[in-house]
Image (tube, grey):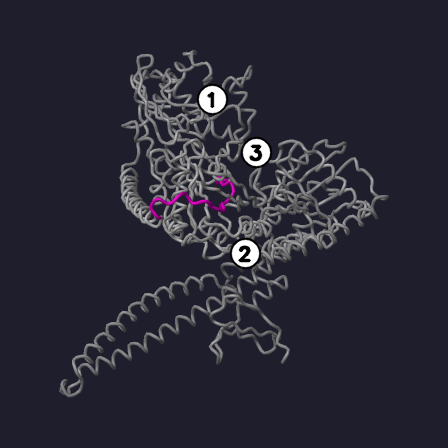
Amino acid sequence: MENNLGEKKSITLSEVRVILIGGRWAGKSSSGNTILRQERFECGRTRTAQSEVRHEVVDGRKLTVVDAPGWRSSLSLKEIPEVDIQRFKLNASKCPPGPQVFLLVIPVDSAFSVEHRKTVEEHMKLLGERVWRYTMVLFTCGDILGEKTIEQHIESEGHSLKWLIERCRNWYHVFNNKEKSNLSQVTLLLEKIDEMVWYNNGSYYKVDEQTFTTIKEKQREVTERAKKRQRRAEEQQQHMKTLVPEGMKPIPKLQMILLGSRGTGKTSVGNTVLGIKEQEDGKRTAHSVARRGFVGETEITVVDTPGWWKGFPALNTPEVIKEELMRSMFLCPPGPHVFLVVIDADASFNAKHLDAVTTHVELLGEEVWRRTIVVFTRGDWLGTHTIEEYIEGEGEALQSLVELCGNRYHVIDNKNADDGTQIAELLEKITGTVAGNNWGHFVPDEQIFVTIDERRRGVEERARLRESQVKAKTETLRDSTNKLQELRIMMLGQRTSGKSATGNNLLHKEVFPSRENERCRVEEGEVAGRRITVIDTPGWRRKASRCTEDLDREIVSGLSLSPSGVHAILLVIPLDLVFTDVQMVALEEHMNLFDASVWKHTMVLFTYGDKLADRSVEEHIEREHGALRWVVDKCENKYHVMNNIKKTDLRQVTELFEKIEQMVAGNSGRLFCPDMKDIHLRIDEKFRRMQIKNVLKHRLEHGYRKRELELKIGFKETLLELQAEIRKSMTSTKPKALTRGTGTKRKEETIDAKISREIEKLNKEILISINLLQGSKDCLIPSLKGDSPPLSVAESLPDRKKPTSHFDKVLCWLSTMQIRTNEENNLTLNFSQTSGYRSVLPHDDLDFSIEADTSQ
């Protein structure tokens, strides 16, 4: 590599500027101390919440080391607070004029997965492509390697880690932070940094000036708004104190309900409020549970509730969780005084999160907002920043939530549970909120409890019936069921349903990557005395309309990995998200690609079995949407539950194998082995139908926009005529005093101005409509007559010169179809009189249908 610093391949830097970056708990702070040969950064349980800079002289060099906050192991930057993104971009400004090297800290004692790679990649994108020139991987926990070299570790870890090393141009080093007395590991690191700087021609990384200025301006604005919010909150708090009579004893009883998404720290908040210090078991909250205790002289009742999936509205939450949320109100009679919505302050909060919170909270009634306080957890990650800066920095969604709660909020550091002042302040805010509601409690609607109870009894009855049907069928197959020495299994399902994790569980080894795989993959293993073959397939999208032909062909190609067929198709459905008609349509479309016998060989495999808690899977099936019962019934009551958290529980795996063997016995030992040619013909047919639907939709949209444009132009002409009449009246030659007064004249002038504004708005709308009309015209299929081949959809069809199928003929026919309006101003497809079809589309309805005309 050419450079201008001389012929030797390194230099000795008198000043070295280093920034430590990486995930949380990777060992950044400890590595910083090793480099500086002094305990300059706090380690252990203390979190690095903000960038810290330390200076030291080591081996005659001036070292500047910046310890940056670690990032969460999240897959997307959308999950990271805006303030953290801004701070990460500005890390390089902490050691002016800029760092010569970023040390990307990766611990050796944990796997570097595809998810870790994606997290690293997205963070590095924030710094720009050029950052890789200045990045070196610093492996920590070197003592774990033992006799193994770091090169052997890199090769054994897989593609993700090798990708990272290649992106860093093979710059890497290993630290054993337990041996800080080993000075040579630091000396060797500094020599590698010298060499890297030589290769970079002595350059260093510098923050773009425009980026620096923009972020600093945003931070200044956020700080100003945060101070205003803080002042407003303090004024509100002072006002609430006036509502509490002077000398009043502490409120004798307080009842509160905790609400929030999973993983936000709801249970920790409840324990902190009650002063419970016992270690949490890490289990998910499956039921609403009331716990009681005393804080001073006040009896506190805290009701913890199951969390919903973050960013998913109540529409996607299983019925049982929604029932538990509503049931929580009846666990603290006569009702709760306050609701605490728990939000984690070290994560992002966007419009999806707001929708999730509001739709779940309002299950309890719209009046809850008057009694709701936002409680932020993980306050220790804020560092020197205030909670108001987090609220203002995150944007409108979080600000809207806080405003819904009347600007009532509080922040808790769960890691500092011994700090009694934070709970005392929270209880003070709660007391003020209760006082503001006339010291009353929230009165839940008793009918909700009655409805839940009645539904529960109905669900239990239907669940017992389904369970008895399954047992009866099992008995009839018992004598004909044999243990098979070999089982070949194919996994199907929607994305993120848990297919890959289940495949790993079945084989008792980590062979399928836990990510959105794009290709089919087959793995084998010896499990429970059987030779097991598992075929993992790409998951389809939630909405059928978003599925692609290539993806469908890849999914069905999984069958070719087992030419003689498969014993079972496991249709994977997660228990922790609702299964609605939308998912049912996508599932049915994919199952229809196979022949009708596929259902005989298919079993529903429910994942996230831990969410059932003490309920049976039959209760879940009967409680949920009818779409789920449809799937289970199509599979003739063949289903099984897997808890992929219990990877060592072989019993759930062997039970599944036994159920598959029963299914095989019910199929007289036949394997599922459809004709692949027929399957590909069905795929062709499916996407030709979609082409017809899209062409028809485009033509209808084009007609709608054309009619809309005509109406706007007509309205504009009417306004121009009206304006001309008014102006003519205003300039009449008759004496003004005789014709009208001053007030009338001013009124006409006002109307004229309003009409002018409306005409101006219409001109803009007409221009937009013309552009949309032109855009939709480009998507339409022109006439297929003559030698000129059509563009767009039709061009993608094979052999355009001569229609070769019914679908091609339909497309040709659609291309000649005219669109007009009828007497009711509805858009009408102008079919020929002999076509046998008629379609009328109301111009304000984008959904369409074609109905047979039986009157002709």
Q: Are marks 2 and 1 in contact (CB under 8 Å)?
A: no
Q: Earlier in the sequence, mark 3 or mark 2?
A: 3
Q: Residues under labels 3 and 2: Cα distance?
A: 57 Å
- Badge 3 marks a residue whose secondary structure is loop
Can you see residue 577? yes
| Amino acid at circle 2 | Ser
Nearer to me, 55 or 836: 55
Residue that carries the numbered disc 1 in the rendered image: 140
Residue 249 highlighted magenta (yes or no)? yes
Label 1 packing within 10 angstroms: few (<14), some (14-19), many (20+)? many
Residue that carries the numbered disc 3 in the rendered image: 281
- Badge 1 marks a residue whose secondary structure is strand
Q: Earlier in the sequence, mark 2 or mark 1?
A: 1
Label 3 packing within 10 angstroms: few (<14), some (14-19), many (20+)? few
Nearer to me, 464 or 771: 464
| Amino acid at circle 3 | Asp
Q: Position of residue 418 (x, y in %)?
A: 43, 31
Left or right of 29: which side holds 456? right
On the rendered image, what quadrant is the N terminus found in?
top left
Q: Position of residue 281 (x, y in %)?
A: 57, 33
Left or right of 814: which side holds 563? right
Can you see residue 629? no
| Amino acid at circle 1 | Thr
Q: Picture quarter containing residue 775?
A: bottom left
Left or right of 540: which side holds 755? left
- Badge 2 marks a residue whose secondary structure is loop
Label 2 packing within 10 angstroms: few (<14), some (14-19), many (20+)? few
Q: Residues under labels 2 and 1: Cα distance?
A: 54 Å
Q: Residues under labels 1 and 3: Cα distance?
A: 29 Å
Q: Residue 796, which numbered label?
A: 2
Q: Earlier in the sequence, mark 1 or mark 3?
A: 1
